[in-house]
Image (tube, rainbow, N blue to C red):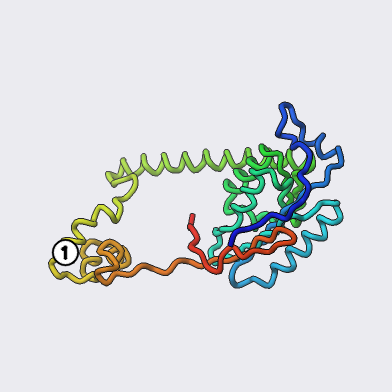
Amino acid sequence: MFMAMLETPPRPQHPCDSPGGNYQGFLARGTVMRAALYARVSTRDQQTLPMQLAEMREYAARRGWTVVLEVEDVASGARLRPRREELIKAARRRTIDLIMVWRLDRWGRSLLDLITTLQELLSLGVGFVSLSDALDMTTPGGRALAGMLGVFAEFERDILRERVKAGIAHARLQGKPHGRPPTVMSHAPEMRALYAQGVSKREIARRLNVSRTSVRRLVGPADGGDTPSPRASSGTATYVGCECELGEQRESASD
């Protein structure tokens, strides 16, 4: 369903809206901060959602922040966060001033993903708070820590690049093929030809060393094929004063 924003008075000019805007100085002027809360659990651990939200609401109240948006993510995969994008979009629209999570692993899919999103929020002038990890990017110390994490993320990227290069060099020395393996689509003409000859899908999969699911998908549902059911995810986004279901069931893109 379409989400409606609670009608609240627009905040004064954002620090990033003017040349030379200063985020710290903006906070010092005493403007009420609009907070968005993000809670995430697996489908097997949904009972912790109320606890996460309650602790974040209490902290926001102590800091004098106004909670304008709450997003709940319930997903079956460890790396799936289908509703998180709603918060990032709100940050880009400048309709929130900070995002709060209960713990960092609720937000980031990996170190690289965590740092990438934190750096974007910093560039937008949007704060980020992780309650259990004592990370508060609305303070100078918190922003400095986020910058240090960025160094580690770049280090991780360098290590991965070197591993890939070393793996390719080793494969060449061994005379082994390297690079991306051929895709299933490269077998599509052969699959269809065999199927037209009356070869069963099971036998086609065995001959071409591909999964039966791939064979069923490529010969088409009209030929009796089927596709695996999508992984389900659900959640809600609550703009304070209006709670909207984001979908009873959706397909979630895996990483």
Name the residue: 24% across, 71% down.
202
Q: Is residue 40 visible?
A: no
Where's residue 107, x and y in %? 64, 54
- Asked whether 147 or 33 is in front, the reply is 33
Q: Secondary structure at mark 1?
A: helix
Eyeballing the image, is 32 above or below 72? above
Where's residue 127, x and y in %? 73, 45
Where's residue 145, x and y in %? 72, 41
Image check: 111 left or right of 193?
right
- Asked whether 215 or 14 is in front, the reply is 14
**Quarter-wise, where is residue 78 in the image?**
bottom right
Where's residue 250, x and y in %? 51, 64
The N terminus is located in which quarter?
bottom right
Name the residue: 61% across, 65% down.
245
Name the residue: 14% across, 70% down.
198
Eyeballing the image, is 191 above or below 34? below
* Residue, disc 1: 194
For the residue marked with disc 1, what is the amino acid?
A: Leu
Eyeballing the image, is 164 above or below 252? above
Q: Is residue 172 visible?
A: yes
Image check: 101 left or right of 187?
right
Furthest residue toward top: 19
Name the residue: 37% across, 42% down.
168
Badge 1: residue crowd in 10 Å (few <14, some 14–19, many ≥20): some
Image check: 203 left or right of 29?
left
